[in-house]
Image: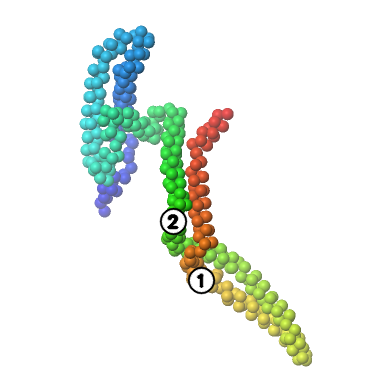
Amino acid sequence: MPKSPAQNSFQPIRHDTWAWKLFLIYDMFMMVLIIINLFCLATNAVLMSDFGSWLFDFFHLPEILQFYKAELHLWVVKTETWFTSYLIMELVLRWMIAILRQHHPRWFFFPFVHWYEILAIVPELRFLRLLRASVIAYRLNELGYQVVPEWVSRRVQFYYHLLLEELSSRVVLTVLEGIKRELSTSTTHKQIIHDLVDHHRQLFATALSEILQETLACELQQQQNQIAKNVGQVVNQAIEDTPELTQLLRLIPIVGGRIEQQIQSIGQRLGENITLGLMQPFTEGTPNQPNRMYQQIAEKTSQLNIHNDALEQLVESAVFESLDAMHKQIKVKQWLETLEKHDQQKE
């Protein structure tokens, strides 16, 4: 059966082909080119600024700055124009190759995936070219080519995770505080909690039936013989503690004592059998398929009316404590723990 394009797009990439090696060389070339370009732009910005004039005047080298402004500055501007044009043509060509090779599920996904490359063409956003160089360096490191020193890579990853954790923590904490404030001040928060409980009634019933099956049924299976024996002994003791029956049997000569023993034995056996029979429906079933008795108990329990002050307070307390627990956990700074652990290892 022929494979669909979606299946073909997930073919493993071979790293021993000439095409792959050329792609790798081109990646390295682009990374070096971008770094040189950004270095030239940054140097030009400094030299053309008031700070550059002050710096060269401070070292008494104004003629060098004048030579740069008169002779070299125009070349920097021209090379930047050429490089920008090259980036545009290169981006269009790569887009066409991505369409022909079906690198993405849809042809228009390419600009969204490579958004930073498109924005880096804008003069005010040229610093985003550094992001492309970083992506190339990261990809080369993933392939085993140590482009960036390991200590630099670890430091960049640390600050990257620090930034992500701080941003995500701020967002989540703001959301949690908003939810808690809304539940505390809103007059409809009880209805929200009721809707929440109603939405999970079926799930609660299913979970409760499985818990009953896993705990109560298993315990009854293990203890049913002992429970039946205890009930039989209770019945036997009850017969012994019935003086009217003992007095009546003693009126029968010779066999009265024997009949009393038989009645006690029969009563004990009856108590055991009745107990086993009553427990039998509660020991059947499996955790995946609880028996009908537990399902009915769970369904009835899940349909409890929560319009009760004590029950409402219980649910509200559980909700607020859950929010507080999440709030406390999110406030833990994982990056700070990593930094402290690193400092301890250094010591």
Q: Is residue 11 visible?
A: yes
Query: Looking at the image, is 60 positioned above or below residue 212?
Result: above
Residue 35: image location, x then y, percent: 33, 25
Task: Tell me, yes or no, whether the two marked residues, 1 and 2, touch with CB atoms within 8 Å.
Answer: no
Q: Secondary structure at mark 2?
A: loop
Q: Which residue is mark 1?
A: 293
Query: Which label lies toward us, 1 or 2?
Result: 2
Q: Residue 249 occupies which quadrant of the picture?
A: bottom right
Give me the C-alpha separation between circle 1 and circle 2: 40 Å
Q: Residue 225 occupies which quadrant of the picture?
A: bottom right
- Residue situated in front as seen by the camera: 266 or 114: 114
Residue 46: image location, x then y, percent: 33, 19
Q: Residue shown at 46%/50% (left/top)?
A: 180
Say few, some or many: other residues with alpha carbon within 10 Å of mark 2 (under 14 / 14 to 19 / 20 or more). Answer: few
Q: Which residue is mark 2?
A: 187
Q: How is the image coloured?
A: rainbow
Q: Residue shown at 45%/52% (left/top)?
A: 185
Name which residue type carries label 1.
Met
Q: Residue 113 occupies which quadrant of the picture?
A: top left
Residue 183: image location, x then y, percent: 45, 53
In the displayed structure image, the side of residue 58 where residue 265 appears, left or right: right
